[in-house]
């Protein structure tokens, strides 16, 4: 299963790349607004950090506008994936991008049917939003599960990318539901790394190691002193 980072923050992306677990990055206008600057410059930098897919989201509502924005993104780096929101125009744009060989990530998917349509139109990634469905008391992970099953049954050439992941449990559930990818905020990835028993275990091992080394050094010192004392005894 692939892990993408859901952020436009370069430092977070560099950190996770160093951990060796970064398969790609997703951005969106809200994540970009948090860091500001030039979206294009950020995308170029992210694409240089990871060879994996980097999603860049179009904001136009009309097909021509989506195509113009997406084509410009696609020129920035070979690993750009154009993110298009689910809609009638979005489907048309996804289909046109597919004809041009430009990969797309259909975002803001909230039902398996929307995902099925996006797959048929040619999206290479389908992004069902888990957390936002949970927020309105609906089963977000159920959509991931259904969509992953539909993709498998019909051998569709696309991947299910579990998005709007809010906690480590979502991640485990997405993996078990058959999602091909999950995109996570940096905070959730960090939560996945840590466990209180791991932390306390590391402290305990370090303490035991230090005590053992000190005891060994003390024993060694005492033995050397005894040898020296024996060597100094006169007449022996
Ligand atoms: C996915 O590509 C989206 O950027 C993201 O997962 C949305 O998450 P949110 O619902 O927490 O904003």
Image (cartoon, helix red, strand yellow):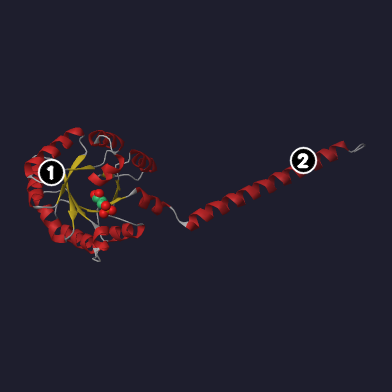
Helix, strand or loop status at disc 2: helix
The image shows residue 121 at horizontal and vertical percentages of 9, 50
Residue depicted at x 23% and y 64%: 142
Residue bearing the label numbered 1: 60
Whether residue 28 is visible here, answered yes or no, is: no
Query: Which image quadrant: the C terminus?
Result: top right
Q: Quadrant of residue 13?
A: top left
The image shows residue 193 at horizontal and vertical percentages of 41, 52
- Distance of label 1 from label 2 (alpha carbons): 80 Å
148 up-or-down from 235: above or below: below
Bin the neighbour count of mark 1 within 10 Å (Cα to Cα): few under 14, some 14-19, many 20 and up: some
Q: Decide if residue 33 is on the left or right side of residue 203.
A: left
CB atoms of marks 1 and 2 within 8 Å: no
Viewer-side label of 1, 2 = 1
Of 199 and 233, nearer the camera is 199
The image shows residue 102 at horizontal and vertical percentages of 13, 40
Helix, strand or loop status at disc 1: loop
Given the current orientation, which residue lies at the most extreme right position? 235
Q: Decide if residue 176 is on the left or right side of residue 101.
A: right
Task: Give the mark nearer the N terminus: 1 vs 2.
Answer: 1
The image shows residue 167 at horizontal and vertical percentages of 34, 57
102 up-or-down from 137: above or below: above
Residue bearing the label numbered 2: 224
């Amino acid at each position: 299963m692939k892990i993408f980072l859901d952020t436009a923050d370069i430092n977070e992306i560099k950190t996770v790349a160093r951990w060796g677990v970064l398969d790609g990055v997703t951005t969106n206008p809200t994540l970009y607004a948090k860091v500001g600057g030039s979206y294009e410059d950020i995308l170029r930098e992210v694409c240089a950090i990871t060879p994996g897919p980097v999603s860049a989201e179009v904001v136009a509502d009309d097909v021509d506008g989506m195509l113009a924005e997406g084509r410009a993104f696609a020129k920035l780096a070979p690993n750009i994936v154009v993110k298009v929101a689910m809609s009638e125009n979005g489907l048309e744009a996804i289909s046109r991008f597919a004809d041009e060989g430009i990969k797309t990530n259909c975002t803001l998917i909230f039902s398996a049917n929307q995902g099925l349509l996006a797959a048929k139109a040619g999206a290479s990634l389908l992004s069902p939003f888990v957390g936002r469905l949970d927020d309105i008391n609906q089963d977000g992970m159920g959509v991931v599960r259904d969509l992953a099953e539909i993709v498998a049954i019909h051998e569709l050439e696309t991947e299910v990318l579990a998005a709007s992941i809010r906690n480590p449990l979502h991640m485990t559930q997405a993996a078990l539901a058959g999602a091909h990818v999950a995109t996570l905020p940096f905070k959730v990835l960090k939560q996945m790394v840590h466990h209180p028993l791991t932390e306390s275990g590391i402290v305990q091992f370090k303490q035991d190691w230090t005590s053992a080394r000190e005891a060994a050094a003390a024993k060694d010192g005492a033995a050397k002193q005894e040898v020296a004392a024996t060597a100094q005894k006169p007449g022996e």
